[in-house]
Image (cartoon, grey):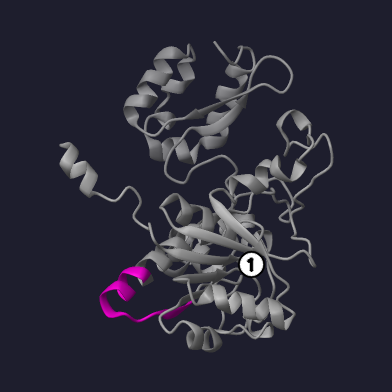
Amino acid sequence: MSKEIVSSISAFPLEGVRALEISEIWAGPFCGSLLADMGAEIIKVESVQRIARGPVNPPKGSGAYPNGDPGERPWNRQSNFNAINRNKKGITLDLKTNAGVETFLDLTSTADVIFCNYARSVMEGFGLGYEKLRKTRPDIIFMLMPGYGNTGPYRDYRSMGMAIDAISGHSFLRGYPDLDHSTNSLVHHPDAAAAVNAVFALTTALIYRGKTGIGQFIDMSQAESFMTHMGEVFLEYQINSKPRERQGNRDSHYAPQGVYPCKGEDNWIAISIVTEAQWKSFIRCIPLPNLRDEKFSSVKSRIANHDELDLTIAKWTSGKDRYE
């Protein structure tokens, strides 16, 4: 590619776009960081009157800090916070005061996008609903992304990722078959999915505004956004009346899929076979004649006999070092 062509291409697709972010935890801040990565100027609006959930300053020894040491400026060393708040400017405002609201409206007059992942009533409570913002900036793009959207019977429920995980059924699906259904990890999948979908919605709105000059309000439900990732599960029940069961480390389409014990204390190896060629290579490497039985000869038969297959593999791996 010639230097002339390279120089004519914008380094960042959202260069020149200014967005105001009112958010915390993961979904909103991650959305802001992704927009910033594409060149947008993100101004994060925070409060000194109310400390954000997900503490900025965890205790010493926390895994959030490099080597567990908060250092002299711990607010700049909290990895969980910094990872999703990079490339941003910031301002603190008390939006419960007239001065704070007026300052926010001044910022609105210069902004292209505003997005908020608090409960749907928060911005209206500040007197900063869509209609008020439109009077300041008629072509503003305003997104509210609460847990369950801005309409419908769940609209007033407040939520975090784990609650959406549970109400969507995902926390049940990703557990182990032998554990209680309330068992859940601290990975909030819905937040990550909502952030990416929010970026898509906002950039689409920017393209539309570029063509028409018209801004818009975007009703973003984090739950609806996430549930599209489980379409296969819903379709299976709708068509076959078959509810999906917990699978642990297994996969509905391949076998073997699992994590198997190795020699030593708490040592494991993950094994994933997705093609017949991989299976043939696998059984050539493992001196276990019964793996060549007819009941393991196809992916369908291996899935049907997955319990026995797992026991056979685990018996062999438990006598081996995980690096062998």
Where is residue 17 shown, x and y percent of the image? Answer: 41, 63
**In front: 46, or 236?**
46
- Number of numbered labels in the structure image: 1
Front in this rendered view, residue 28 or 49: 49
Pick whichever, 235 or 165, lies toward us. 165
Residue 266 drawn at (x, y percent)? 72, 23
Which image quarter is the N terminus in?
top left
Query: In terms of image quadrants, where is residue 51?
Result: bottom right
10 Å crowding of disc 1: few (<14), some (14-19), many (20+): few
Q: Which residue is mark 1?
A: 167
Q: Is residue 209 magenta?
A: yes
Residue at 65% in and 62% down: 91
Which residues, given as a range, are shown in magenta? 206-218
Residue 26 is drawn in which quadrant?
Answer: bottom right
282 in magenta: no
Q: Give, as a three-letter code, the residue at label 1.
A: Ile
Task: Name the residue located 59 percent from the left edge and 74 percent from the top edge.
Answer: 148
Q: Quadrant of the C terminus?
A: top right
- Note whether 276 is above or below 86 in the view shown: above
Name the side, left or right, on which 66 lies relative to 4.
right
What residue is rendered at 66% in x and 82% in y? Answer: 121
Residue shown at the point (66%, 48%) measured from the top left: 81
The reply to whether residue 176 is in sight is: no
Give the secondary structure at mark 1.
helix
Please state the horizontal and vertical placement of residue 8, each as a whole percent of the image.
21, 49
**Above or below: residue 56 compared with residue 92:** above
Residue 209, position as x, y percentages in the image: 33, 75
**In the drawing, does residue 234 fall left or right of residue 177?**
left
7 to 90, vertically: above or below: above
